[in-house]
Image: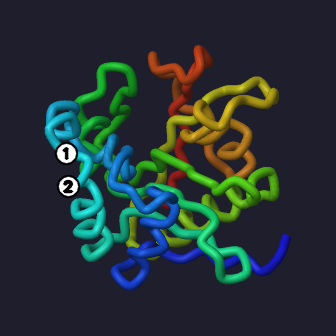
Amino acid sequence: MADVTVVPATAGRFDDVASLLAPNGGTKGCWCLYWRLSAGDFTRTRDNDRPDRMRRLVESSPAPGMLAYVDGVPAGWLAIGPRTDMERLVRSRTIPVIDDSPVWSVVCFLVRPGYRRQGLARRLLEGAIEYARSQRAAGLEAYPVDSGGGRIHTSAAYVGTLDLFTDAGFRVVTTTQATSAGLPRLLVRLDFS
């Protein structure tokens, strides 16, 4: 792979975040707010309000995600943040809270077409681990799909795959009641202490 840089999505990088979350310059779509808002708030947030909400997140601390650049081009995104800031996780009936440790959650990967299957998700995850540690998180949790080692459609892989996380040192804590593309999702954790 060419020169890859992974950095937190901070205020000066909002245009790069937007180029990944709305590649056609529109306001429609999730804008990676799905996990951060309650179901009601997400539904009530109009498409044209979502970029402003993401801009406010990018301008605050901690950064809401990590950006991967390949030869200076924004090519990947990973959404991250304290689990307590992920309103849909706080209220989830299918993904349990296992303890009161102040962990952060990895909730979404996005790799631009043309950059997939080159290890960019791994690099994003490595950057997220480093960033969460620097922000004194107790650890990271994620809720990947167990693909059984097989290939899955990108629409199901946005949560990451089990192998991606176990290769990075995460341990399986439990199977959740959540699924993606009919496949089970697991709760995995990497403790920093």
For this rendering, which residue is in front, 66 or 52?
Answer: 52
Q: Residue at x 37, y 52 (%)?
A: 31
For this rendering, which residue is in front, 114 or 41?
Answer: 114
Residue 88 figure quarter: top left
Residue 123 figure quarter: bottom right
Q: Are marks 2 and 1 in contact (CB under 8 Å)?
A: yes
Q: Which mark is residue 16?
A: none
Number of marks present in the image shown: 2
Place of residue 16 in the rendered image (x, y in percent of width and height, measured from the top left): 48, 73
* Residue type pointed to by label 2: Asp
* Residue type pointed to by label 1: Arg
Q: Residue at x 53, y 44 (%)?
A: 189
Is disc 1 placed on a helix, strand or loop?
Answer: loop
Residue 29 appears left or right of 118: left
Place of residue 124 in the rendered image (x, y in percent of width and height, measured from the top left): 62, 62
Q: Residues within 10 Å of mark 2 (few under 14, many from 20)?
A: few
Q: Which residue is mark 1?
A: 46
Q: Which residue is mark 2?
A: 49
Residue 82 appears left or right of 1: left
- Let me know if residue 132 appears in the view: no
- Let me know if residue 66 appears in the view: yes
Is disc 2 placed on a helix, strand or loop?
Answer: helix
Residue 1 appears left or right of 85: right
Q: Residue at x 43, y 79 (%)?
A: 13
Q: Residue at x 23, y 30 (%)?
A: 91
64, above or below 98, in the image: below
For this rendering, which residue is in front, 46 or 173?
Answer: 46
123, above or below 151, in the image: below
Place of residue 156 in the rendered image (x, y in percent of width and height, measured from the top left): 59, 31
Place of residue 64 in the rendered image (x, y in percent of width and height, measured from the top left): 37, 63
**Cα gap from disc 2 to disc 1, whole angstroms:** 5 Å
Q: Residues within 10 Å of mark 1 (few under 14, many from 20)?
A: few
